[in-house]
Amino acid sequence: MSDSELARRWRLILGRYGENSLPRSQLEASDAELDLVLSYLYDREYIERGHRLQPGAGGGLDPSSLTAINWLERTRKLFPKSTFERLQTQAVERYGLTELLANPDTATTLQPSPQLGTAMLRIRGRLDAKLEAGLRRVISNVVEDIVARIKATFVATLTGRRDRFRRSLQPLAQNFDAKNTIRVNLKHYDTENNRLLIDQARFTSRVRKRLPWDVVLCVDQSGSMAASVLYSAVCASILAGLPGVNVRLILFDTSVVDMTAMAHDPVGLLMTVQLGGGTDIAGALGYCETLVRTPARTVLALVSDFEEGGSVPTLLSTVSRLRGAGVRLLALAALDEEAQGFYDPHVGGLLADRGMQIAALTPEHFAEWLAQVIR
């Protein structure tokens, strides 16, 4: 890397602290704009620490040329999508650019991503009520984006469909395979009368209908669980719309709230959920145990970081009883904004020893895992 390129990069890193050595006025036009939008956001860090930005000093906030709204648009054009998503998330969550939510129409210009949705959940309790419409719009866009990516996987993996590649000997109208029937009978086509004589009718096999499964999603809503709550709300809404699956949605911290009535409405759920508090997994699973009607056809999926604040012996006893009764027990480790798992390995190991299957999975892989369990 050339000395000039190194100097350029250091100038953009240092911002106003590099102004004496390389003033913004000497930067290329594109770099000057990069420096301006970066300073608009990250100089807020210095202000929060008590630094004073003098008028006219390089790298200042330059309020005459930038507002939160045009900062967003200029940043979108200057950076790759992944970098822009990170910047907008930090702008809202870390640096308080809540002006972006003041106008619902402007809120729609924010790039939907799980990281942004997680940031919205974390700051929701600190926002003024007049920003709620913009916040709802952002969360709705994030949910729609996640649903568009994962719903097809859930539907394809968890629902029985007609199998075009397997023949059936049952001559049922709903299983009639017109395409293959025509193909195998073309040799019987009556050219004189312009009609096809059917010698062999073909029927396809359908996946056998099964009794419904009860799926209990037990989701930790303590302070570290924002990303997992977001993903869980979306998964619950998709599962609630599938045939053959009865969903119960339970949220907990040190108390337990049954949110099953809102499982079909992830946006409403996320606008209601209160992140924070401690973690009492034992109490939550104790409540879930009361919901089990048919143990052999029940899946209980715990979503948590396993940082148990309640009674570990009680937790383990409950898991053992559920396992002994025949309930399928799954545990999904908490996911961060990058969909990477994090959890207490000690408690996780104890749960695994009692028969609970544990994994750190994205929603798409959770669908595949759930399908393996209930087949």
Image (cartoon, rainbow, N blue to C red):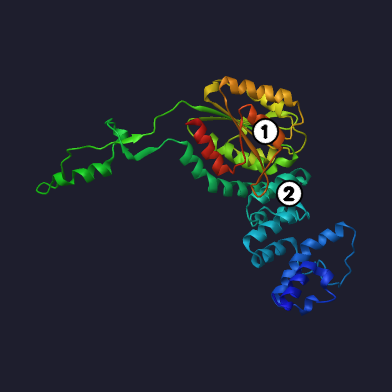
Q: Which residue type does callout 1 highlight?
A: Gly
| Depicted 161 relative to depicted 101: above or below | above
Q: Nearer the viewer, mark 1 or mark 2?
A: 1
The answer to whether the residues at label 1 and label 2 have Cβ atoms under 8 Å apart is: no
Left or right: residue 211 versus residue 280 is: left
| Depicted 329 relative to depicted 46: above or below | above
The foreground one among 275 and 137 is 275
Q: Which mark is residue 131?
A: 2
| Image quarter in which the N terminus is found | bottom right
Left or right: residue 49 versus residue 297 is: right
Q: Is residue 152 visible?
A: yes
Q: Is residue 62 visible?
A: no
Q: Position of residue 214 (x, y in %)?
A: 54, 27
Q: Residue at x 66, y 22 (%)?
A: 318
Left or right: residue 214 versus residue 34 is: left
Q: Position of residue 33 (x, y in %)?
A: 72, 71
Structural crowding at the residue carrying mark 2, measured as other residues with C-alpha within 10 Å and reported as few (<14), some (14–19) or many (≥20) = some
Q: Position of residue 257 (x, y in %)?
A: 69, 29
Residue 308, quarter of picture? top right
The foreground one among 139 and 302 is 302
Q: Residue at x 55, y 42 (%)?
A: 365
Classify mark 2: helix, strand or loop: helix
Q: Position of residue 320 (x, y in %)?
A: 64, 22
Left or right: residue 122 versus residue 153 is: right
Q: Which mark is residue 243?
A: none
Residue 88, quarter of picture? bottom right
Q: Residue at x 58, y 20 (%)?
A: 325
Q: Which residue type does callout 2 highlight?
A: Leu
Structural crowding at the residue carrying mark 1, measured as other residues with C-alpha within 10 Å and reported as few (<14), some (14–19) or many (≥20) = some
Q: CA distance from mark 1 to mark 2?
A: 43 Å
Give the labeled residue for mark 1.
349
